[in-house]
Image (tube, rainbow, N blue to C red):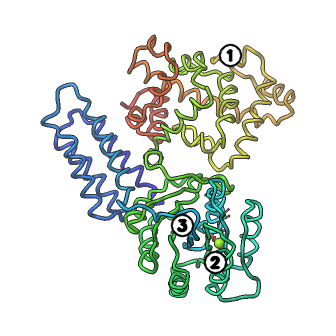
Amino acid sequence: MVLDNLGGRITNALRRMTNATVIDADTLKECLNDIARALLEADVNVRAVQTLRKNVTRRVNLEELAAGVNKRKLIQRAVFDELCAMLDPGTTPAELKKGRPNVVMFVGLQGNGKTTSCVKYAYHHQRRGWKAALVCADTFRAGAFDQLKQNATKAKVPFYGSYSETDPVRIALDGVQRFKTEGYDLIIVDTSGRHKQEAALFAEMKQMEQVLEPNDIIFVMDSSIGQAAHDQAVAFKQSVKVGSVIITKLDGHAKGGGALSAVSATESPITFIGTGEHIDEFEPFKPEAFVGRLLGMGDVSGLVKSIKEAGLHENVEMYKRITEGVFTLRDMYDQFDSLSKLGPLNKVMGMIPGMSEMMKGTSTADGNARFKRFQHIMDSMTVEEMENPKINFSPSRIERIARGSGRHPREVDELLFEYKRFSKLVGKVGKMSKKNMNVNQMTRNASQTFEQFMDPQMMARMGGQVGMQRMMRELAKGGLGM
Ligand code: GDP
Ligand code: MG
């Protein structure tokens, strides 16, 4: 909770700087002080914070800047880059080589996603030509072996475990031995966790490390643990040789601010992130996307890429209208269609600034089902209703649409509510685009338009998602707060 505020606090500091009438050395210093304070309170290592401050100040040498340089953008960019650099501990993850038995041990507190991540990690590597196998050395949690067995079977990864043996080290050793003799080159050992950091857990881990001599020890951390991240990471690092970090549950609301302190505490790189319960909701870690998310900018580069891959940018008409601030129910319909082409919806929605709100508390499957329902409702609407952004729906009309689509009128209301919220947002973005660029030029190249439309700096200037929602409220009251 506190930590997830980290992104918000940094964004606010940047926003205050952006809103200042003059940007001089004092404005910059104040902005950096705020950012430094937020980072230090999140237990990011003092040295790392000093480096950020020093590097930004050096890059943004205000006295020597040529006239006309956009200082605000320059500062934002520098802070963004330095936060990315902060996620790079300067060490590389242990190198694993195919064709020899590599042993990787997963550690972390109970419930943080070790078992899930072990299987995802095995699956990820298996698909890339590794001969992967899983060993369940968790004798602490009831049903641990069954859980691993089930997941491993689904992933078609061989596994080893025991229902009778109570010594986890014994099981680990037996399992690793067996897979070594069978010629596996990636042997993954899932270990016990505890609810809290406690001596028994660390003793067991240390013993396991000594006996197995793993090539890498991966510390698994839940992105939402907040302020505890630093202490937890330190505790694990002090007991065993943590070599890399996996951050889980980044599909939720947690922005993962704790990751910065985990990297700082373990001096180990984040290698993967978990973005859902499913086996393929696992991806290599990308600092830029992560910092974008932290600051509420959305994963802009990822989004633009996905949009290009899905050919969405070819929908010139739609983006022309969006950049002009017009958004109809038909656009929303098309948007749902296109979005489902882009892959896991939650992930895509998370990338679109302002959209993730709409996906709050829903899984990918739920989200997709919800959009399908919305589409069915829209199928019962008239062309006029779909294409006139100023249309009003009377209660009796809503009733009729509900009946026509076999849904409850409440769901029609819900759809209209989402539509209104989103079209307002589009209107806002449209205004911004017009202010910032030539409309004719924009329409000539829709792909380019979209990139500008989702310009990270522009988003940051609007204060990210949070700022944008605030602005919309201000707008509704009649005054634009910028
Ligand atoms: P362990 O006790 O550390 O082994 O944790 P588990 O692997 O059993 O995971 C605990 C819970 O978190 C399970 O319900 C998992 O499905 C869930 N989980 C793990 N990783 C993720 C993730 O990336 N996203 C989401 N949404 N859930 C996850
Ligand atoms: Mg487990």
Above or below: residue 476 compared with residue 155: above
Determine whether, in the image, residue 6 is placed left or right of residue 168.
left
Among numbered discs 3 and 2, the one appearing first in the sequence: 2
Label 3: state its secondary structure.
Answer: strand
Q: Label 2 crowding class (10 Å Cα cut-off): few <14, some 14-19, many 20+?
A: many
Cα–Cα span, label 3 and label 2: 21 Å
Q: Which residue is mark 2?
A: 176
Label 2: state its secondary structure.
Answer: helix
Name the residue furthest top.
440
Ligand 2 in which quarter: bottom right
Query: Residue 130's spot in the image, x, y percent?
Result: 63, 60
Among numbered discs 3 and 1, the one appearing first in the sequence: 3
Judging depth in this view, the residue of 462 and 156 nearest the camera is 156
Q: Which residue is mark 3?
A: 220
Q: Which amino acid type corresponds to the residue marked 2 in the rendered image? A: Val
Q: Which mark is residue 387?
A: 1
